[in-house]
């Protein structure tokens, strides 16, 4: 479904990603791991067209995504839940959700998609007229995920979605994401908490200094000595 092959990304004169490769099959739940500064968010941004490639290729459903516009990417079926949520705090929950339906394909089914979001996150229905900036961290994250779902994506990207979210709400959101996956949406999750990521995903990629250094099923990585030293603090 999605393949990144030896991509590199520059931020001005600074190279943020040097050599990242990964592939995701339709219906998979995959984690992207790495320390701060490893290149995870830049990789996600490159997929959706926020950052141009300096080298390498990105292919989605058989089509090249090099030099693609973000709006075109969303319209093709890829949606991003960005780090930090990026909500419009002075706008209502309903208005924030509606902003996720700005592509031509999504605008055809706004009412239907909002009802689907409310079914997944009932608290948002209760607070639909409340400004997003007045919600708790967990509720804001639900709005951010709901906004991404408004375009009915086939591939959902989540960049550190649990920062500032209470543990109980994290469990609820993870349960909802599993349900979304069971309904056929492919999920790529960027997450700092290794155990949480492995509880959700079946496979994972590990980035270090802008390069893919490890990959494989989660149970395989847990038994890999290099992974244990780097991420679990084990010798």
Image (cartoon, helix red, strand yellow):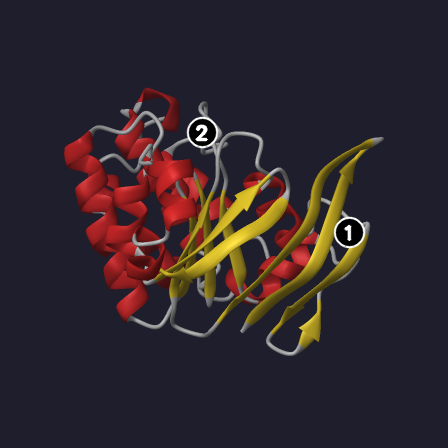
Q: Residue visible at 63% across and 53% down?
A: 48
Quadrant in the picture for the C terminus? top left
**Residue at which label 2 appears:** 91
Is 166 above or below relative to 126?
above
Q: Position of residue 212 (x, y in %)?
A: 58, 51
Q: Residues within 10 Å of mark 2 (few under 14, many from 20)?
A: some
Q: Residue visible at 51% across and 66% down?
A: 108
Is 212 above or below relative to 10?
below
| SS at mark 2 in the image | loop
Dot 1 or dot 2, earlier in sequence: 1
Residue 123 can be seen in this image = no
Which label sits on residue 66?
none
Q: Position of residue 42 (x, y in %)?
A: 63, 41
Which is nearer the eye, 6 or 42?
6
**Residue at which label 1 appears:** 53
Which quadrant holds residue 37? top right
| SS at mark 1 in the image | loop
């Amino acid at each position: 479904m999605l393949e990144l092959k030896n991509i590199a990304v520059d931020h001005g004169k600074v190279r943020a990603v040097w050599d990242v490769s990964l592939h995701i099959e339709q219906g998979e739940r995959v984690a992207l791991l790495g320390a701060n500064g490893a290149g995870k968010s830049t990789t996600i941004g490159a997929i959706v067209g926020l950052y141009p490639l300096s080298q390498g290729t990105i292919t989605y459903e058989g089509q090249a995504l090099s030099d693609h516009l973000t709006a075109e990417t969303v319209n093709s079926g890829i949606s991003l839940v960005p780090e930090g949520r990026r909500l419009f705090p002075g706008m209502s929950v309903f208005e924030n959700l509606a902003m996720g339906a700005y592509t031509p394909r999504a605008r055809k089914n706004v009412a239907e998609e909002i009802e689907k979001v409310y079914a997944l996150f009932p608290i948002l229905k209760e607070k639909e007229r409340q400004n997003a900036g007045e919600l708790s961290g967990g509720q804001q994250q639900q709005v951010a995920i709901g906004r991404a779902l408004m375009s009915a994506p086939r591939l959902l990207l989540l960049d550190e979605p649990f920062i500032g979210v209470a543990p109980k709400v994290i469990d609820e959101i993870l349960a909802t994401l599993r349900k979304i996956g069971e309904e056929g949406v492919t999920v790529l999750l960027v997450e700092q908490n290794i155990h949480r990521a492995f509880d959700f995903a079946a496979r994972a990629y590990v980035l270090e200094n802008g390069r893919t250094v490890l990959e494989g099923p989660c149970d395989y990585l847990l038994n890999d000595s290099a992974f244990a030293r780097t991420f679990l603090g084990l010798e």
